Image: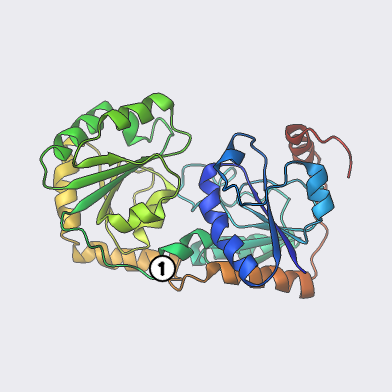
Amino acid sequence: MRRFLLYFSQPYSIPICRPLQEEIEARGFEVRWFCDEPLTQKALHKSDRLLKNIDEVKAYNPEIVLVATNVVPDFFPGIKVQIFHGFSVGKRSEAKGHFNIRGFFDLYCTQGPNTTQPFKKLEQKHKYFKVVETGWPKMDTLFPLEIKKSDMPTVMISSTFTTKLSLAKNKEVIKEIKRLSKLGKWHFIAVLHPKMEQEIKKMFEQMQHKHFIFYDTSDLIPLFKQADVMLSDTTSAITEFALQKKPVVTINNNQPAPYMINITQASQIEKALEEAFLRPTHIMEALETFIAQTHPYNDGKSSARVIEACLDLVQNATIKRKPLNLIRRYKIRKKLGYMRIF
């Protein structure tokens, strides 16, 4: 009997782990959850089997730990597998962001060629982990793509919590969104980053009316399916949405890509959305190119590929011992209140 542990920190990681849980259970294996943030634990279902402390993890003795955050306790049993908590969108430097090797993982399950290629180079350099391109489990429920049934064109608004990048914290942008939503020609649905300040969430709640609905959720895929176009800033939700081959309008994106319609002023929003609804040829072609490099898998089976990669590593792979990594090991022990060596 294979024993898996799903390790996460924030509520937005639960939709990443859920397809993995279903795949593991479908194969007849055991699976448990562990969360290193006590407040986040409440976001799980009552039926989810949550291990509440380190002693319970050690007693469970997982063979494989699937990690939807940046670090994982080295003293947990089993191989450690990085499945990522988002796409790389350039909000952080290379030293701190997606390609930062923190010395905790035995396997990286990458999302597509533009993450696989850099990690393969790092694999050759460090030699103490393997890299396998699997696609991202969170996207399994996005596929197969569905035809939207609503008659009214729908705009999904998504915003990061990073102040200098966030459209939700731009007064002129919010003013324009309010105006456009009251025209009645488009329906707006909005979601904010789970870490967004409560006063911003409250403001969005107060903006609601017939054609503007705010969703306080981290389960974004059902919202992606409702929308025709996204209006956003700099967030990994853009990448997730774009995998549907739907246009995205961005406001002051940190690294605007050819598939985006990027603008810099609130006064440009209406015209940009009108362009997006027309699905311009150059935008749609750029979307196809972007998807091929970022996440070319549209079969909904990325979780299955992750599990296969894990089993292959357990059964066949030989890798070097990981570095001592003393500072990070100390930090994770301090966070979890576990100061024993093993």
**Residue positioned 38% across, 35% down in the render:** 165
The picture places residue 333, in percent across and down from the top left corner, at 78, 37
Assign the N terminus to one quadrant of the image.
Answer: bottom right
Q: What element carries label 1?
A: loop
Compared with 59, 217 (above or below) is: above
Residue 145 in which image quadrant: bottom left
Compared with 289, 252 (above or below) is: above
User: Viewed as shown, does residue 18 lie left or right of 332?
Assistant: left
Report the label total: 1
> Residue extending furthest front?
47
User: Viewed as shown, does residue 182 lie left or right of 339?
Assistant: left
**Residue positioned 78% across, 74% down in the render:** 315
**Towards the viewer: 307 or 168:** 307
Assign the C terminus to one quadrant of the image.
Answer: top right
For residue 159, say whether it is visible.
no
Compared with 196, 6 (above or below) is: below
**Towards the viewer: 215 or 179:** 215
> Residue extending furthest right?
341
**Residue positioned 24% across, 57% down in the render:** 228
Q: How is the image coloured?
A: rainbow
Check disc 1: other Cα within 10 Å, few if <14, some if 14-19, many if 20+. some
The picture places residue 253, in percent across and down from the top left corner, at 34, 43
User: Viewed as shown, does residue 91 lie left or right of 224?
Assistant: right
For residue 79, say whether it is visible.
yes
Three-letter amino acid code at disc 1? Phe
User: Viewed as shown, does residue 242 lie left or right of 207?
Assistant: right
The picture places residue 211, in percent across and down from the top left corner, at 19, 42
Residue at the spot of label 1: 143
